[in-house]
Amino acid sequence: MANPEPEKRTKAIREAAATLESKAVVDKQFPDLFKTFTQPSHYTENSSEVFQPVLLKKNITLSTFGLMEMKNFDHKSPCGIAPIINRAYFVVKNRLYLWDYVESREVKIHEEADEIVGVGFVKPKPGIFVDSVKQLMIIATTHDIRVIGVVNGANDLEYVDSCMTTGTTGVHMIQIIGTSQGRVFMLGNDDNIWELDYKSKETWFTSRCNKKMQTSSNAFISLLKLSSDSVVQIAVNESGTVLYQLTKNSCISVFYLGTDGYTFSSVYKKSDCIADAKRSNPSFPHFTPDSHIVSIHTTTATESLNYHLVAVTSNGNRIYYNTQKDGQYLNYDAKPTGLITMHVRAPSSSMATTDLVGKTLYKSALTMFVKNPHASETQSKIVTYCPSLANLGNCILANSNTELIENGNAIDIHGKVLCIEELPTGQHQEINEFKSLYQATARHFLILTTSGITILAKQRPVDMLHNLLTDTGSDSLHRIKEFEPFFNQFGYLNASSLCFNLISCGNGAGGNSLYDAKPIGPREVNGTEILLKHFGQVTSAMIDSSGRSYSSLHDGLALFMYRAIEGIWTRSLIKQTSTSVGTWFSSNIPAEELSNIQIILVLLRGLIDRNTQLFPFKPVNPETNSLNNLLELITYLDEAISFFKYIFEDSLDSIIKLVKPDSQQRLLKTDLKTLLTTPDGMSTIASDLTFALIDYTSKRFTNTDHVVDVLTSQCGSFCRSCDVLLFNAAKQIYSARNTNPAQAKAILQDSFVTLTKIAGEIPAIKAAEFAHQYADQGCHLYGIRLALDCTKARDPSNASNASFEANCPTDVTRQQIFAAKQPFYDIALQILIKVVKDSSQPGAYRRELMQTAFNPVYDDKMFQFYAYDAFLKEGIEQILIDENPPNLEEYLKNPHEYKRLRLLAVYYRSQGRYDDAAKVYHTLATTSDASISIEERIDFIAAALMCARSVTSPLKQYEMNNLMEDLRVQKRLLVD
């Protein structure tokens, strides 16, 4: 086709999107960890630091003052880390020491009148504190419990005194935890669970702050007291719906919290946890007579739907529990009904049966603990286990058989460990770290010791690749073999994807934060390109639906693109909020998130543009064609993001409200994938938004030149300059409804002239809308001409006519041309046939439309034959005989079928070509078609005889005499 058109772009982008999703199967098949458990448990120790899963990143030593005060710290007193406010804390009697381990490194003291027995940093309930209060500091003393709002100020913490206090009634609250909904639970030294409630206002019957004993009505509590089985820990799940309680004798109780903010119900108590685990694995050497559970940890649905709680024993065993007895465990948020032992995992061989663990952490499949915590007061050994992604991240087939192999390592740190806390990143924690963008914050673990803070960093595969590139420096080309273990371990597909990850995401790395990734310089980028040139040419392990394989470079690019845009790909762009005050529209995707993805797309485009050898687009073959499609998607998505960022920054609500109501509803349901890969999304919804933006701008300013310049320069193919002309034409067509006939005719003609100038850029859905609006206003002629002008723009040389030449096979190109033109054919024919069948329309007007549709100026034989098929199907073929449009005889002659032959005979008679008519009737009378009855054949013979007798030319009469003789013979045979 001579001109690019929206349909071709839609097809390319749709194919690219399909490619992305087909490669993403490697992530979609990433297994639920429970399905990878085996007996015995498997571990691997990495000798090379490059592949170590957890590395010591930084030691931050307490100030001299802090070290002096730490000497007075009693290890039974509260201590911990509040990473959201960058503070570590410990308590000495009535003093709470808050240490800024990031900025000033100063230790500040918060003093209470009474001894402090419990401290908790929790999320506030919504709507009670100002938005700047992201954390509440709950301080429990021997006398009362106080709620204090905490704000990260410019230079230091700022405290918001809430005046919320309640008495302790003699109970020491030794552990304080919060839920994601803002509920606060406390473990008392009376072995009860208490809930702290606070409100914005005091009422007649309740104060602003009070506490409630939640476990007093449970019968088993009294039994616990009789047996002196004290409660040692409480834990709540991520969604804040289930709370667990652990006792000294390894009993675990389950409570349901619901989602209403006040439910607290006892569900189940399991008192044989260790015995049950031993029964499951009687040969486990790490179950000794002294074995007991030292900690419990909730899990997330991302990790597994098959277990909800992990308990760590004193010997390092992990016991995995499910909270459903009735088989509903795949519904992660279902109300718990029990506590079932699902799996027991022994520690690695580096742990002897006599070794003990303490200060444990388990989160998102990573286990961390102190080995033999009482062995030394000045040195600690941290043991970590985390899943090896080498096999888990290469599950291409749905039935891939994988097993969990954990990477283990041990890290020596200075000081006695007081607690371990993971840094919250605010991001959804994925076990599959192949998906993690390099610029995203990796997992970090803060370890509070008696000497300060130690920061451990979890190495993602992309971090390992970066470290390899840093080590090789500018010699990557000559040290290429050093990268082979990395590509072999993680697979060429994932490793290639990680190369694109580094090149495209390094721009956002290298900040000043303790947790930022290392910056990526030109040497690393150059080294990554060398890796793609060397390893990217290896055939990928993935095979598409047609059985075709591509290079690892191609599949790695597609996989990385999907990973980069996955977060916004299927999210609606706009959301609607309704309140009693009114309804308004707003962005559903933060502008910062869009900007980060746009940067990635720009860097990807730059990589492709400057590496023509790495990304060849010729010769044309399936891979180069697919790369072209991916490049089209990169460009189009970049421009689409620019467009939405522009309207998000402007008055989005006002712009959306200018969109037609039905389009508003479609927009609310539309995600980025639908918008970019469907004709309706790319034409109707995008155009409606553009029209609304231009309309909004024209109402605010005298002209729309500025917005047009912005859209055409930044949003190129997504929002083209022709959209402005489309908008103006649409506005003209609509305004013509409210003017007198003469003005309306002039306005419609002007709009039609405008649209014909950009016929090649008008999508079929928009063309149909305009054409039918013309028809509704009595200008059927413009509707038909617009549709046919669009087809002409898509095939200006009428290459499709070659399909009807003798011995010309139908090829792929002509099939593509027909596919591009057919929607417009349908638009023209819908209008034309409706008028032709309408007997109330004047005959002259119907004739005029016929002449317009089949005007030789279009010379489109494909349309002509397509239209003649439609006329025959509608039973209005007589008008074809009356009007004799171009190439009708050729159409009726081939193929030889009953309906066409009958019409061909009528056509010849209408033209006075009686000899040809007689021959056609003879063919109909003598055809072998069994569906033609004897009566019909006799009628055809009679018609043939009449036509033959009508031939007056002496040259043809001899032939007609022979024909009539044969007809008489045929008639006798039929009658007899």
Image (cartoon, rainbow, N blue to C red):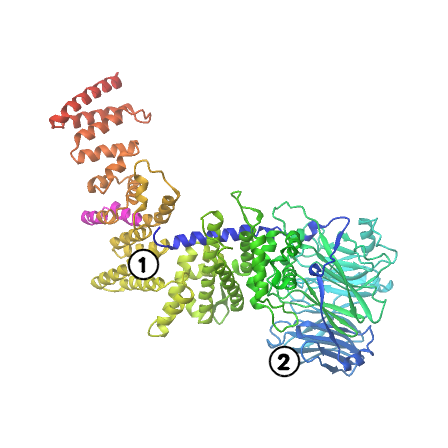
User: Taking 896 as reference, is 289 left or right?
Assistant: right
**Secondary element at image label 1:** loop
Q: Quadrant of residue 968?
A: top left
- Magenta segment boundaries in residue numbering: 828-849
Residue 973 makes an appearance in the image: yes
Above or below residue 140? Residue 737 is: above
Q: Amino acid at mark 2?
A: Gly
Return the residue nearer the eye: 173 or 724. 724
| Outermost residue toward the right in this view | 289
Residue 414 is left or right of residue 121, and the answer is: right
Q: Is residue 304 visible to us here?
A: no
Mark 1, residue position: 758
Question: Image point 22% across, 62% down: which residue?
Answer: 746
Instruction: Tell me if residue 839 is in the magenta stretch.
Output: yes
- Circle nearer the viewer, 1 or 2: 1
Up-down relation of residue 695 to residue 772 (above or below): below
Tag 1: amino acid: Ile
Judging by the rendered image, the residue that carries numbered circle 2 is 153
